Image (cartoon, coloured by chain):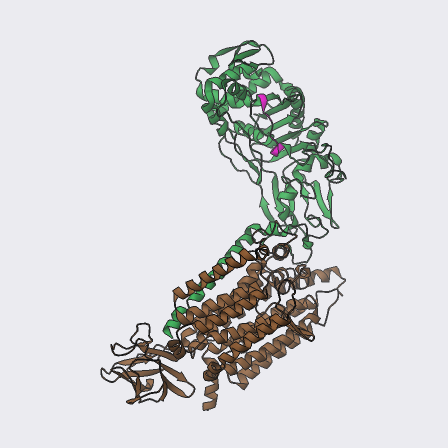
Amino acid sequence: MLDNPVLQNILSVALYLVRILVPLLSIYVVCRCFLSLKAGRRREEPVVILQDMVTKEIIPVLYWENSLGRSRSCDIVLPDGTASRDHAVLMRRESGWIVVDTESKAGTRVNGKKIDHSAQILPGDVISMGSTSLMLKRTSEVKNLKQPKRRQRHAASPLGLLFTTMIIQTLLCIEVCFTGEAFDYMPLIPLGALVVMEWGLYLYSMKGLNRVSFELETVAFLLSGIGIMLIAGTGVEKTYMQLGAMLLGIVLFCAMIWFLNDLDRVMKCRLAIAILALILFAVNLVLAEVSHGARNWISIGPVSIQPSEFIKIAFVFVGASTLDRLQTARNLGGFILFGGACLGALFLMRDFGTACIFFVTFLIIAFMRSGSVRTIVLICSAAVFGVFLILKFKPYIAQRFAAWRHVWEYANETGFQQTRVLTYTASGGFFGVGLGNGYLKNVFAANSDLVFGMLSEELGLLLALVVVISIALLVFYARSDVTRSRSTFYSISACAAAGMMLFQTCLNVFGATDVLPLTGVTLPFVSLGGSSMMACWGLLAFIKASDERTYAARRQKAAR
Amino acid sequence: MKTTGTRSLILYLLTGGFLAGLVVFLLSFAMEGGNWAFQPYNKHLAGGGQLSYAGMVLDRNNVVLAKSENGERIYNGDETVRRAMLHTVGDTNGYISTGVQYSYRSELAGYNIFTGLATPTGKTTGNDVKLTLDSNLCKIALQQFNGQKGAAVLYNYKTGEVLCMTSSPNFDPGNVPGDLNTDTSGKYDGIYLNRALSASYTPGSIFKIVTSAAAIENIPDLESRTWTCNGSITVNGNQITCLSKHGSIGFKDGLAKSCNIVFAELAMELGEEKMTAAADTMGFNQSFTLDGIPSSKSVYNVKGAEANELGWSGVGQYTDLTNPYHMMLLMGAIANDGTPVKPYMIDNITTHFGLTTKAGHTEKGAQLVKPETAAKLKEAMRYNVTSEYGDNLFPNMAVCAKTGTAEVGGGLKPNAWMVGFSSDEKTPFAFAVVVENGNSGIRAAGGVASAIMAEAVKIK
């Protein structure tokens, strides 16, 4: 059938139209997902009310965790000279409202009784700090409270968006099927696996757990699907490992969301997680063999894993913290020590790209915890000094980056990969030459470190941009949800995870295109790499957990 | 949580960095994308050669000068046409950087930033480039050179269409000599150079047009003056020589008989400043472009020159340099009251499904000569032809011209020049011809000029 030249032309044009349609549909899905995420958020209105016992002033409580004190940076400012600057924290937990005394001088009293660290409170109870007494009240008890206008916002149907995602994957699959001389049925296997995983998670989370949102998962499925179809273009058998990793990643995603539900449990496990991460690094350093300049792989039987990918998750766990702990344990000592150990291990492995990712994540967490510009400047100058020392004593490391911004002069040496990426990106134009029709796939690490180039060549620059911008949008989403999440633990971890993924995207995309030095890191969700795929789903769990609705739905069900 | 919210703004720093990087990448993609794609290793261009699937190059009569068939680049069937068009069309390997096949390789290969090298039908088919040149005219021009080195250019100074451009020496792009890049004897030296655009020649007597312009503008009694030529004068103990003894001679005859003494004295009288000003206005010390392809820079530099050197500079010797393209443009300017029409050679670029992406058009360039000066120069140059060169060289055209015999030193015969234009509205052509070591301007270059003007008249 494909021998007929007329039919072949018609087919080529049809496949080209498919390549125009795919980025347009993807733009639709990504836009609707993020708009719907924004629209579906809780409105910034009081959760509960505090009333001053003396002045009868009504103080709305806006967040799940609120700091109380004399300092102007507190969520509820007490104009009271006898209260400490950061006196106490009022927190909402599954069990109800809790007040935690954050090492105040005068102590905190509930109904006149001095509390020992923390106490549960009910509506009607009076909290006394210094000479101020506040009574907890339900919002319904106060009549003339200003109610913000409720606008009916139209959120996109999660079902429809997932369905569109499935159509995009089907279109990509058709492209792969027509790559060879004859129609190939093999690419239907990864498509089938993707569809089963998508709808499996959808049913489990929407019907099984009664959650209301599925946007983050949809975006992740869109990106993973594009990556898997790109790999299928180079050989269907190569997708099996990636699909397996994706399944494990989804399991990890669900498990982490369950684990993150109970913050007391999380805070108790943090030390164990930190120790486990360091042990994993130690094991890595002992067992790993050098491959392509870095010692970041360990082989267990037939599978090889990259421990540093999983340590990324641990790093976020260890870094984030609840507000009451942020107020009491102000110094970053422990975390700096842990971060330093991680960076040291990565330098020993010569994995500079991952080291940069850890460092940037460290900066994000450190700043969000302390808010101290001075600390950040100190850390940065220490890092610059460290890099200077390394370059002075090990100058060969600098040579690895000598081709940066001069790749055309080293086109057949150290600039080989970058020049190929640029040439084939330009050859692909906006809509690509078609899945499996590219030539970049023959270059080393094309489907991992250089995947942006491969994506641009085969599916076009437009889709490649949609992919990286949707990762950037995760940052916007995580940031806009900061004050709405159930604890600073969730806000910090979501920002750190999103920032980590965006920075990794920067290193991948700009490294391959010679805007930054090439360091060899993966593009989240898209690159070939089992450990990386799992870690991305794990990091996504932090962002999902910061969305208040993730757990709200479950509570509604329990109440019913 | 309020403070945590404020602190999370740090993420915008990261996002800002991401966007900045993206802008850097996209800008270089938009500007450099064509160069990125045109790499010898790019397998989308197939077969190693970058023109394997490129479009055609056609002349003004749709004669195919170059096309691709089955992954190979094929040139016109006539060897003299192939050679005559070589420097305009370019070679397969892109060594001739001023050739269309190199300068317009993106367009020929069908590259654009939106579709890259991909096409909806899956087959790479490039765009066709149609030139304004007439391949037959170029062939006749090259035949006139008879193996001598040099270049000839001719354009329609009303429309801007370049009709003839040829450069010698050249090689056959359809049958490239095997030792072209390995030869060390020097027989292929400068073979990739388009002498019409990129060479730098001593102008010799044709520079007297510039000196004349400076004199017309600065010396009121120029027409009534006379000079005495005894074959040479001595300035600062150095001789300035003339080719013959003209005796007592006025300005117009001085130009027609090309008396060195008249123009050396004029240059010395005008001085460094006025001479430089006139040369600069007329396009010296700057580069021009032909459809984006730059010409070499003509040079007039008399900074700190001795009086005798200034004298020699006035007759187009000393350090003076120029190229045929610039001289043709200057002729076009004088013909057009001082402001030339910009020459162009790309008539149009058309995609294989018939969409024209670029079309040449008539456009005025910057003024090179004042209108009054242009009129006087035109009159003087017309007198050159009627009194000295003879109208039989250019029948029925009323040509205004100037010849030149530029000493090149080193024991070599001088280079022969002829530049000019037809002042007849029906034959609006301007030309510049240089024959290396041709000895006599009127005999060597005049023959080529006469032949191409006669042929240009026949072009519709």
Q: Colour of chain B?
A: green
Task: Give the number of callouts.
Answer: 0
Q: Residue furthest left?
A: A55
Given residues A406 and B128, the one toward you in this image is A406
Residue B331 lies left or right of residue B450; in this view the side is left
Residue beneath the point at 70% across and 42% down = B64
Q: Quadrant of the C terminus of chain B?
A: top right
Occupied quadrant, residue A517:
bottom right
Occupied quadrant, residue B73:
top right
Q: Is residue A128 magenta?
A: no
Residue A221 image position (x, y, % from top left) = 58, 73
Residue A264 lies left or right of residue A12; in this view the side is left
Residue B343 image position (x, y, % from top left) = 57, 35
Figure check: B342 above or below A428: above
Q: Which chain is brown?
A: A
Given residues A31 and A558, the one toward you in this image is A558
Residue A369 image position (x, y, % from top left) = 41, 72
Occupied quadrant, residue A277:
bottom right
Write the start and end of the magenta stretch as one range: B196-204
Figure check: A345 above or below A98: above
Q: Is residue B198 magenta?
A: yes
Q: Quadrant of the N terminus of chain B?
A: bottom left
Given residues B52 and A262, the one toward you in this image is A262
Given residues A101 and A14, the one toward you in this image is A101
Residue B439 image position (x, y, % from top left) = 66, 20
Q: Is residue B59 visible?
A: no
Residue beneath the point at 76% across and 61% down = A4
Q: Is residue B411 visible?
A: yes
